[in-house]
Amino acid sequence: MDQSLVMGGYAAYILAAYGVTAVVVVGNIVAARRRFRRTQQRLRDQLGRRAAVGPEVRRAS
Amino acid sequence: MWTWFFRLASPPHFYALAGKLSLWLLIPALILVVIGTFGGLVLAPPDYQQGDAFRIIYVHVPSAYLSMMVYVTMALAGAIGLIWRIKLAHAVAASCAPIGASFTFAALVTGAVWGKPMWGTYWQWDPRLTSELILLFLYFGYMGLRSAFEDLNQADRASAILAIAGVVNVPIIHFSVIWWASLHQGPTLSKLEVPSISTDMLWPLLMMILAFTLFFLGILAMRVRGEVLEREFQSRWAQDVLRSTSPVRAN
């Protein structure tokens, strides 16, 4: 095989290093987006529960 | 300038700004990553000693740089939060930790993978490697400490103190290759007056460092938005934001 294709025999190391970095980069995007959406959803649910309880509390008082 | 600073520190202003900024930072970052990776893997010539294995530098150095830069940002934000009691600063510090930990992990793994063909081993208890590993533990400790407190103010204060105390490790990492006998090669980029890397090899590295910096800022903006929303949940503006972005609006 052409020497340049296998990167001088270091292809496995180079690709492993780039692969791990790619996973970290993509993982950061996914984790940040997921966390933001979960936080939004959780807070919205809390807000919804408050809105549901609110009129009862007002009526009671 | 102070007016600008205090306006930036205002949670609703920062929330809106970060929402616009995150994409504008992430898109150029990803474009630069592609260009830098192409430059590093294809255009840069092989090193005369290390051959093609040196190409790992294009992911290892930006990851290692980010691991330290994020920690310093986290410690600075923690200090600002402690001294001026700016809540946003604590949100920034808390958001830095997972990003910094992930890039410290990347720096350690890419370094190990580079070390195997060059040194004959994945790991050595070398000053640079050991101090970088301690940095990873500091990030874990920071996140663990935060989650140990139920009270957010206590978590902010305790974790800020840990971040500030741990910042002493950053110059140790940087200068370890100068202070002690080390397997790790000396600094490449800080010697600007005597460049120890050819321009053909340097430009993709600088591009990757810029890309990683923009990437960090973009992810940080995304994470801080969530933190701010959570911390400001009781305030009117946060509830308005949640209602306005709700997929199903309550009547």
Image (spheres, rainbow, N blue to C red):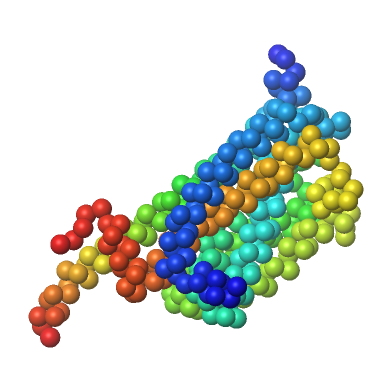
Is there any visible trace of residue B155 in the rendered image?
Answer: no
Query: Within the image, what quadrant is residue B111 found in?
Result: top right
Residue ID at (53%, 53%): B218
Considering every residue shown, the one lying at the far left of the view is: A59
Residue ID at (12%, 86%): A61
Marker count (numbered): 0
Foreground residue, A61 or B177? A61
Q: Is residue B40 left or right of residue A49?
A: right
Is there any visible trace of residue B129 in the rendered image?
Answer: yes
Foreground residue, B93 or B7? B7
Considering every residue shown, the one lying at the far top of the view is: A1
- The location of residue B43, given as percent across then percent down, is 73, 28
The relative height of residue B151 versus residue B174 in the rendered view (above or below) is below
User: On the rendered image, what quadrant is the C terminus of chain B found in?
Assistant: bottom left
- The location of residue B31, given as percent across then percent down, is 58, 39
Query: Within the image, what quadrant is residue B48 found in?
Result: top right
Foreground residue, B3 or A41? B3
Residue ID at (66%, 55%): B67
Foreground residue, B176 or B78? B78
The relative height of residue B235 versus residue B194 in the rendered view (above or below) is below
Residue ID at (37%, 60%): A39
The relative height of residue B62 versus residue B40 in the rendered view (above or below) is below
User: On the rendered image, what quadrant is the N terminus of chain B found in?
Assistant: bottom right
- The location of residue B5, given as percent across then percent down, is 56, 72
- The location of residue B242, given as percent across then percent down, is 31, 62
Considering every residue shown, the one lying at the far bottom of the view is: A61
